Amino acid sequence: MARIVLISLSFLFVTLVIAVPVAAVFHRAFSEGVATYVANILDEETLLAIRLTVLTALIVLPLNVIFGVAAAWLIARYRFFGRRALLIIIEAPFAISPIVAGLCFLLVYGAYGPVGGALAPYGMQLMFNLTGIVLVSLFVTCPFVVRELLPVLMVTGEDEEKAAITLGANGWHLFRFVILPNISWALVYGVVLTAARAMGEFGAVSVVAGSIRGETMTLPLQIELLYNDYNATGAFAAATVLTALALLTLVLRGILNRFGPKKGHV
Amino acid sequence: MTFEARNIYKSFNGTEVLKGVSLAMEAGEFVALLGASGSGKTTLLNIIAGLQHADQGQLTLDGQDITRLPAGKRRFGMVFQNYALFRHMSVADNIAFGLRVLPRRERPGRVERREKVSELLDMIGLADLGDRFPQQLSGGQRQRVAMARALAINPQLLLMDEPFSALDAQVRRSLRSSVRALQQKVGVGAIMVTHDQAEAWDLADRVAVMDQGQIVQFDTPDALRNTPATGAVRDLLQGAA
Amino acid sequence: MVSLTRTAPRVLPGFSLSLGVTVLFVTLIILLPLSGLMWQLAQLSPGDYLKVMTSRRVLVALKVTLSAAALATLVNAVFGLLLAWALVRYRFAGRGLLDALVDIPFALPTAVAGIALVALYDKSGWIGGMLADLDIKIAYTWWGIVIAMVFTSVPFAVRAIQPAIEELDPDEEAAALTLGANGVQRFTRVILRPLLPSILTGVVLSFVRSLGEFGAVIFIAGNLPFKTEIASLLILIRLDEFDYPAAAAIAGTLLGLSLLLLIVVNLVQARLYRYLRTEG
């Protein structure tokens, strides 16, 4: 009896609070027909926003992978002063709200900040352009790859790496032939999460993007713009793209969980 | 190929693990480091391998100082306690690894590498298992692959850390003789860490008995039995049948 | 001849490379921006800070944010526990689906969550329309803010509580039953108490997330000053007015509160775990 009540309540809650809103996005996007939906997606500004969003992710991903691998390797394999502090600092972006994060960047890298101010005379501007969007995206996504890699590196241990070294492997061999195959699944997972977050970040990006139409509008910003322009259908159409991306992320995650290596396997 | 360790000291966080250990071995000799856990034998082996660094002391190979030589440059084949096979590589790729990572000038060609691998697979009696992955092998088979991988680089010295401890008694005994045969066939000097006295007896030309960070006696098995240097040595030997 | 190795070289290669990359990245992307906020705050005199923070608009915004986050967290504590319990303890058709749905708010960009909730709760939406007939309004009110916060932070509660339920020992519950404990006693003593640390974690994570939530909230909040304006939005408004000190003051307060809560939960948790262990 309790079982049925609890399960029903769970489904009711999740359906009302989570599933129905997602369905409503699609309902609204297609409310004026498929033709309007297609026209909305193919709108020039929306396409530019998609382009910028993808471009941002493409820049953020490799940088984050390099950082994530380096930091996870450092924390998993070496004992040094400040190791625990480093771990906490890397997790910090998860605890900081997006608007506060964006503000932090503006205060340092903006034209009135110390770094931005120093660069301004040379005609270099870091905020209100692609650089700014990339910088805050790096901030909000930086814990993802580290978080996925660290437990895997901890579990695999260093035996294989030591064996490789006694056999004459240099740093590159070690990475390419031993470490990378061992962390590849976790790395893919981290990349998926990073990509999803980089493309979907709204608050932090909205602070530093400057919202220049057709120039610094990422897809989430474009959704807000369309919505405030009383083009709700267009906003919902743009939102379906990001929703599809989110659902794809979850599907990929499920696939990785099911077919990826099981924990503790040797 | 003569190897010598002189006056090796090593501490971890203020605890002295090795207190002035010296060891000299002849070419092609099989030496066992025998001792209870905590006697410092594994630390000594790791220092010889270059996986740890001594606080003090010197290692020489044929008179050459190799104390600061990185592990990879020493060409000491190492067999790890849990074998540390590369789980994402086939048996053949595991064995070929040391050849594959050689500098371009010294690296044998693909065909040559394949020949060397199949030669080694023959030697360890696993000729048909080159395409398997480590998970698909039995413990004894893994141990032999680890041996072959270490021998593939034509090592100057073969180092083994408790090479039989992960195996059941039956397999252990049959592998002992094959390890000894392999070592003699290749003609490489070997150092084996073990806590099993019978194992040391069966395999080694000379046994170095370690206790509390020092080598208390280093001699042939017979000499050890006839004239144990200290009570500690006698106790250790009594443990075995 | 004894060679001394004073500075033993590290055996695994790559220490300096990985240290260099990590320190450079952490400095440019995390530490420098955060110190920018600290620097801006440091330039503010206590009087200026108080003046910003005690202005009526800021006070109302904080009250709206904190109260909505508190209610959302309460809802999430209850339903987080319920969902975690159902997912761990029961096997039923659609369990995998339920599990996946819980993660949608993690994966869904907040701006999408925001307009999705508007689509549902404004007067032309499925639920909003029904409620309008009853003269209940959710979109563009404080209640809308609560719903947006519930949406974005519910997975934090579920995922924090889930592992703790997995570790609960069903035998202990059975034992409590045989000892004559009634349903309520069994729930509070045998189930709820061991779960307390993880519920606390879930509650704090969910609250911190709600405090800072922006994208999901602003679409449905209506954003009327003195009514439905959240603190994050007010930071943005001050920024647009180039009033950086005021923006920094509000942001610093939010950040300080979040960090304080996270530190406190870590400390309390350590104590709770010890307390539970000594109790057996």
Image (cartoon, coloured by chain):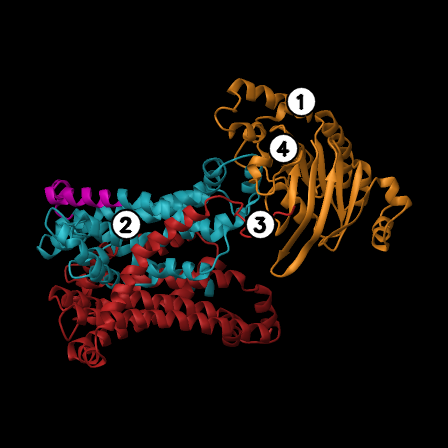
Give the amino acid type for the residue marked by disc 1 in the picture. Asp
Q: Are marks 2 and 4 on the same chain?
A: no
* Residue B122 tag number: 1
Give the amino acid type for the residue marked by disc 3 in the picture. Thr
> Can residue C136 be seen here?
no
Numbered disc in front, either 4 or 3: 3
Parent chain of label 2: A
Residue B125 in magenta stretch: no
Parent chain of label 3: C
Give the amino acid type for the residue marked by disc 2 in the picture. Ala
SS assignment for the magenta stretch, majority = helix
Magenta region: A31-57
Q: Colour of chain A?
A: cyan
Q: Quadrant of residue B68?
A: top right
Q: Are marks 3 and 1 on the same chain?
A: no
Q: Secondary structure at mark 3?
A: loop
Q: Colour of chain C?
A: red
**Total tally of numbered discs in the picture:** 4
Relative to C228, A170 lies left or right: right
The residue indicated by pointer 3 is C5
* Residue B150 tag number: 4
Parent chain of label 1: B
Q: Position of residue C191 (x, y in %)?
A: 51, 70
Give the amino acid type for the residue marked by disc 4 in the picture. Ala
**Disc 2 versus disc 1: distance between alpha carbons?**
53 Å
Numbered disc in front, either 2 or 4: 4
Q: Are marks 3 and 2 on the same chain?
A: no
The residue indicated by pointer 2 is A198
Where A101 sits versus B155, above or below?
A: below
Q: Which chain identifier belongs to the orange chain?
A: B
